Image: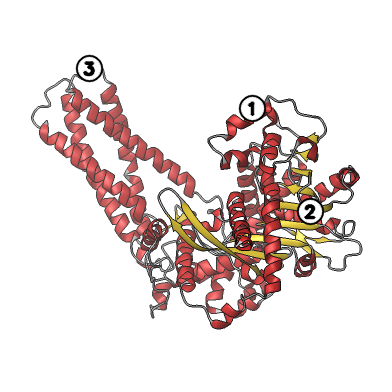
Amino acid sequence: MPGLVVFGRRWAIGSDDFVLPGAFELFVRLLWWIGILALYAVHKGRFNCPGGGLLHSYLLVLLVLLAAIICALAALVYVSMQGTISNPGPRKSLPKLLYTRLLLYFPEFIWAVVGAVWVSDSSVHCEKTVINVIMGTVIASWVIIIFTIIGVVIVFDPLGGKKTFYLTNSVSRNLESSQSGQLLYNVKNTATRVWEKRIRLLCCCIVQDDDHRVAFTSIAELFRAYFSDTDLVPSDIAAGLTLLHQEQDKMESCPKEPEEVLCHSPSSLVTDDLDIELENAAHYMLFAAAAYGWPYYVYTNPFTALCKLNGDCCRNRTTDSDITGSDRRNFHFGSILRITGLQYRDFIHISFHNKIYEIPFFVALDHKKEAIVVAVRGTLSFEDILTDLSADCEDLTLEDVLENGFVHKGITQAANYIYQKLINDGILNQAFTIAPEYKLVIVGHSLGGGTASILAIMLRNSFPALRCYAFSPPGGLLSKSLADYTKHFIVSVIVGKDLVARLSMPNMEDLKRRIVRIVANCNRPKYQILLRGCWYEVFGGDPDNFPTELDGRNQDALTQPLLAEESLMVHRSPSYNTLEDESHLNSPPQYPHLYLPGKIIHIVEESSSRRWCSSDIKYTARWSNEAVFSSILISPKMITDHMPDVVLKALNSLSQEHRSCISC
């Protein structure tokens, strides 16, 4: 913070990011220099072989060149270690050192070519050991040059050559110049195009139509708006997440207030209701997991799944089920059968069709619970990711529903696609013709959970008795009015510190402000934060007590620009303004607040005793509310807690514990 500016443009790397890569290269260069020096000392006076004179000159120049590179690297690493993330002043000489180091690549490149020519010269008849060492030197030089080029490509910022600036509220109000307005428009438009190109590159393997192009533009606008008001490089974000995780763990280790403990003490009636819903959720989670098809089955049964599925694909499949989409070798359907334990005849419709805003689902008869189950698949493809990222808000207008409000655009379109299939194609009519006394249950995990929730809202008027179980749904899904309306028929199940359940644009804005605040106030160098953070994540221990105070530092030193760098503190981005102007926090939100659907069951890991061959984890569950998920929690489990096998394991553990208590 901020990004380094060299050659007249900004790069996606900070002036304090050269410590670790520079130290590694310095170590390699030192070993290399010692090895060449030893080779020269051993063969000194014995360069009388054909080509030996050139070898003698080559080694002497290489030793001098390596010594110069080592000195430049040592100075680069030392200067990069100075200051803090938000105080680049002590590193103002780093660009000059970087220019020096880059200039040394030219003689190194030339000498690598000379070495390659000498090694390939057939007239050279020196000792084989010497030739192999020179060959190794040439290869090492080329490897370092290639990795440097790759590094330059990675840290290249396509917007670095543009005149970027941040506008405070007062400046934007005084922006009357048409030229300034046009400049701002051009910067925004360029940033959107850059993000759109990146998204297209990531999705190059899928067929792109008009829907994809609209989604690309919408997602690019979202990313551009989110990153436009900060000057953070990736390592700043990593350091901020590390500090936030340790700060969060320190707060969790503090004893809770008595009022906070009492508020989680449910009545016996609420506990009975929770036990019933947990048992139902454990049952229906099988259907939500089965919707993922063979990838989930292979993931949970890595040693036996392929053999079993290969056996299933050779059997003749009955044609009672209506199947659309591609299912080569019957792997998807075979996996669904094995996970759910249902028979062929129990499936009414199965769709493996997958496009943007069109996700797979199946409709089946669940005789155990006497239910018609609609199971919607979660995120499993690039098309699903584009549906997830189409996070604009749109109005959901339904007849006879007064609680109309905002919903997630991409997920709503996916729900509308399934709704059209179920109603217009007569799939539900067919199901209720077969089992008219059964109830309707809609389930899904992740993206499937969000889609199932909005689908349940759409079908609520036609099927008043329907139930919906949304497992780990996205947090930014429904407006407050719709979220309250769904508490009568939707149950959301969240495990631990699941990231997706807390993922919404207001929460992401809050996370950005927290990262900027903590890295700006920490007075430790970035390399210390990252090294200590890696140790803490891998080996655990007590959270480090990193100072997070300005400690009376000189404000002039804090705002020193790094050569051509334009400091975030000087430009006063909206995120940094929150450090000194708390009124910004009370300003109208840029994005509307969206919430989780229905009543929320929060499952947390109470205790864990891990051994070499097994792991015994105990879970507890309680009713929760949307306020608990109003902030993103940083944890190594923020991703694993979202996985369907972890959710199913937690539900099965709680269900078995409840049954054992009843038997006792």
Residue 595 in view here: no
Q: Quadrant of residue 340?
A: top right
Q: Which residue is situated farthest in the front direction here? A: 664
On the rendered image, what quadrant is the C terminus found in?
Answer: bottom right
Color style of the picture: secondary structure
Can you tell which mark lies on residue 441? 2
- At a point 71% along the width and 49% down the height, the residue shown is 387
Callout 2 crowding tier (Cα within 10 Å): few <14, some 14–19, many ≥20: many
Q: CA distance from mark 1 to mark 3?
A: 64 Å
Where's residue 521, x and y in %?
45, 73
Element on which disc 1 rests:
helix
Q: Amino acid at mark 1?
A: Gly
Comparing labels 3 and 2, the label whose residue is closer to the camera: 2
Can you tell which mark lies on residue 311? 1
Pointer 3 residue: 123
In the depicted structure, whether residue 639 falls above or below residue 356: below
Q: CA distance from mark 3 to mark 2?
A: 82 Å
Where's residue 530, x and y in %?
40, 59
Q: Quadrant of residue 481?
A: bottom right
Position of 411 compared to 11: left or right? right
Where's residue 330, x and y in %?
70, 30
